[in-house]
């Protein structure tokens, strides 16, 4: 998501400083961004006290920050499962330090939260007013509760410290540049399809997801960042085209031009059974997702094919 956001900001003529520890990210996804003289890359962990962040920016020659987008976090069950402490840390310590940095510079800050704050939802579709159904000590809690803490930090700072804060709750975004090995649904399905293997399904495949193409998500993130009324109002970023995991696998097979062939494995712990955003607030900003699943999957498959041939 971050590399796509950076490219959108560069396209608007902004100067961008990327701070990433590359714990789950790939620097090659930033190749285009780093070819611009408008981009500075700082290889660092943001889950550090604020003076350390200030020092990192000073060392990179950055004296002014006009806006902060906090997207740093492991984001897939495999990634946060392997780094639960770091996940809690980047969404708590990291968010608080970035908030302090934003306040020091008088800069607005946007925090990338997640539909996982709704847990395994008891309300459907999920509106921003829903408080969620999260197991605080479950295996996903480092991520779910980490993001909930991050939202709380943003809310406190916005309410009582004068932060110009925004929160977006992303629902299953997908597209080019995803890591085939990080266990997320679309890359796992696409990777298996392109290898001629059976596509892996956790559980029965009847659980639903509403997949959001990355370009649509970035468009709404930038819109929320530019909307003052979105202070203290989290906004769902998603697509309300709800499909079962089996239907999504069928669409991936069609996009990859392979027969539909799946392999069922055990369900993941606390795996949400239904996931669909209520997009009323996003629609009020005159935004609608414009990329149908089939079109987004064609783009994604084509990127994975290109990667495969480039790194074969
Ligand atoms: N893609 C989605 O479907 C989705 C859904 C909900 C929320 N989100 C959120 O959006 C953000 C981006 O997700 P993504 O899908 O692009 O994941 P990603 O893993 O591709 O990107 C996350 C980036 O954060 C970096 N990072 C992690 N910990 C860091 C730290 N302590 N300091 C500096 N950098 C660090 C990683 O190296 C990586 O480049 C995350 O905060 C994630 O929780 C994404």
Image: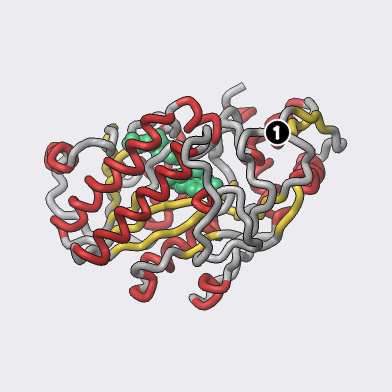
* Ligand 1 placement by image quarter: top left
**Spot occupied by residue 22 in the image (x, y as percentages of width and height):** 38, 31
Horizontal side of residue 254 vs 133, given as left or right: right
Horizontal side of residue 186 vs 148, given as left or right: right
Regarding residue 255, the answer to whether it shows in the image is no
Q: In which quarter of the image is the C terminus?
A: top right
How many numbered marks are there?
1
On screen, 104 above or below 57?
below
The residue lying at 63 percent from left, 61 percent from top is 123
Would you identify the image quadrant in which residue 35 lies? top left
The residue lying at 64 percent from left, 54 percent from top is 275
Would you identify the image quadrant in which residue 264 lies? top right
Q: Which of 297 and 170 is in front in this view?
A: 170
Is ligand 1 less than 8 Å from the beta carbon at label 1?
Answer: no
Q: Mark 1 points at which residue?
A: 267
**Spot occupied by residue 60 in the image (x, y as percentages of width and height):** 17, 39
Q: Residues within 10 Å of mark 1 (few under 14, many from 20)?
A: few
The residue lying at 22 percent from left, 59 percent from top is 66
On screen, 263 above or below 291?
above
Q: Which of 261 and 302 is in front in this view?
A: 261
SS label for mark 1: loop
Regarding residue 108, the answer to whether it shows in the image is yes
């Amino acid at each position: 998501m971050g590399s796509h956001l950076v490219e959108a900001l560069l396209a608007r003529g902004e100067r961008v400083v990327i701070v990433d520890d590359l714990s789950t990210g790939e620097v090659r996804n930033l190749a285009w961004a780093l070819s611009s003289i408008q981009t500075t890359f700082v290889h660092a962990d943001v889950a550090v006290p604020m003076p350390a962040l200030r020092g990192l920016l000073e060392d990179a020659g950055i004296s002014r920050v006009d806006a902060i987008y906090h997207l740093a976090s492991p984001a897939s069950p495999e990634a946060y499962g392997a780094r639960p402490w770091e996940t809690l840390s980047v969404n708590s310590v990291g968010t608080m330090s970035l908030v302090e940095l934003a306040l020091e510079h008088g800069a607005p800050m946007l925090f990338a939260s997640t539909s996982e704050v709704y847990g395994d939802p008891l309300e459907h579709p999920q509106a921003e007013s829903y408080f969620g159904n999260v197991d605080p000590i479950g295996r996903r809690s480092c991520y779910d509760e980490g993001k909930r803490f991050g939202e709380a930090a943003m809310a406190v700072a916005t309410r009582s410290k004068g932060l110009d804060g925004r929160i977006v709750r992303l629902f299953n975004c997908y597209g080019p540049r995803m890591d085939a090995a990080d266990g997320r649904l679309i890359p796992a399905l696409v990777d298996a399809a392109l290898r001629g293997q059976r596509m892996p399904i956790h559980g029965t495949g009847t659980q639903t997801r509403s997949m959001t193409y990355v370009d649509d998500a970035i468009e709404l993130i930038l819109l929320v960042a530019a909307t003052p009324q979105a202070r203290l109002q989290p906004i769902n970023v998603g697509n309300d085209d709800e499909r079962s995991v089996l239907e999504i696998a069928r669409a991936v097979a069609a996009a990859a031009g392979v027969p539909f062939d799946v392999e069922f494995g055990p369900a993941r712990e606390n795996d949400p059974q239904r996931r669909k955003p209520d997009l009323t607030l996003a629609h009020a900003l005159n935004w609608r997702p414009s990329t149908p699943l089939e079109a987004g999957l064609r783009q994604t498959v084509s990127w994975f094919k290109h990667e495969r041939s480039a790194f074969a």
